[in-house]
Image (spheres, helix red, strand yellow):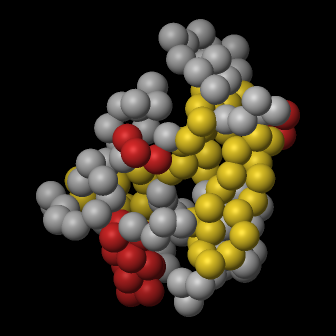
Amino acid sequence: MNGTVVKLDDDGTWECGHVGHAGEPVPPTRLRLDRTIELNPGRPTSAPCRWTNCPDCGTYWRVWVHLKVAKPSVGWKASDDGSKPRRCRRAPVLDIDRVIDRVKAESGRVSVVQHQNVWPADDEGVWVFRLPEVGRDIQLESSTGMCPFLV
């Protein structure tokens, strides 16, 4: 999903775009670099990274400070039981979001993890679906997060 990289503004902020649960436009949330956490503290890397979650939609963002860019991830953990209702969802809504929603509706125990590479320009269009009691995972792949998927 190379097209989702967002450039940070000069003040170290960026917007997380949203839509309401019915698809209606919702104002974006401005996220701040000074409210991020180091991703791998004490671990040397060629691409140091920080992270934060959007308080309104829950999107997990990774931020490369030296490149002045941020990138969202698409996923869901079974521990996210809906006890924290979100006022909106990330926009744009991709086909992978719709697939995750349908799978969650069938089995709330599923966890979905998006593959994450080191650099923001790397293709991260792989999602792994896991059920705790099943030994094998299901992987969906699409460089854009849109259909068709390789399963």
Q: Is residue 126 above or below residue 102?
A: above
Q: Residue at x 32, y 58 (%)?
A: 145
Q: Is residue 117 above or below residue 151?
A: above
Q: Which residue is nearer to you in this view: 104 or 20?
A: 20
Q: Which residue is nearer to you in this view: 143 or 85?
A: 143
Q: Residue at x 64, y 17 (%)?
A: 66
Q: Quadrant of residue 107?
A: bottom left
Q: Residue at x 82, y 33 (%)?
A: 11
Q: At which x and y percent is residue 130?
A: 37, 61
Q: Residue at x 32, y 38 (%)?
A: 123
Q: Which residue is nearer to you in this view: 112 or 147?
A: 147
Q: Which residue is nearer to you in this view: 133 or 6?
A: 6
Horizontal side of residue 10 vs 131, given as left or right: right
The reply to whether residue 51 is visible in this rendering is yes
Q: Is residue 114 above or below residue 129?
A: above
Q: At which x and y percent is residue 151?
A: 16, 61
Horizontal side of residue 130 vs 12, given as left or right: left
Q: Quadrant of residue 6?
A: top right
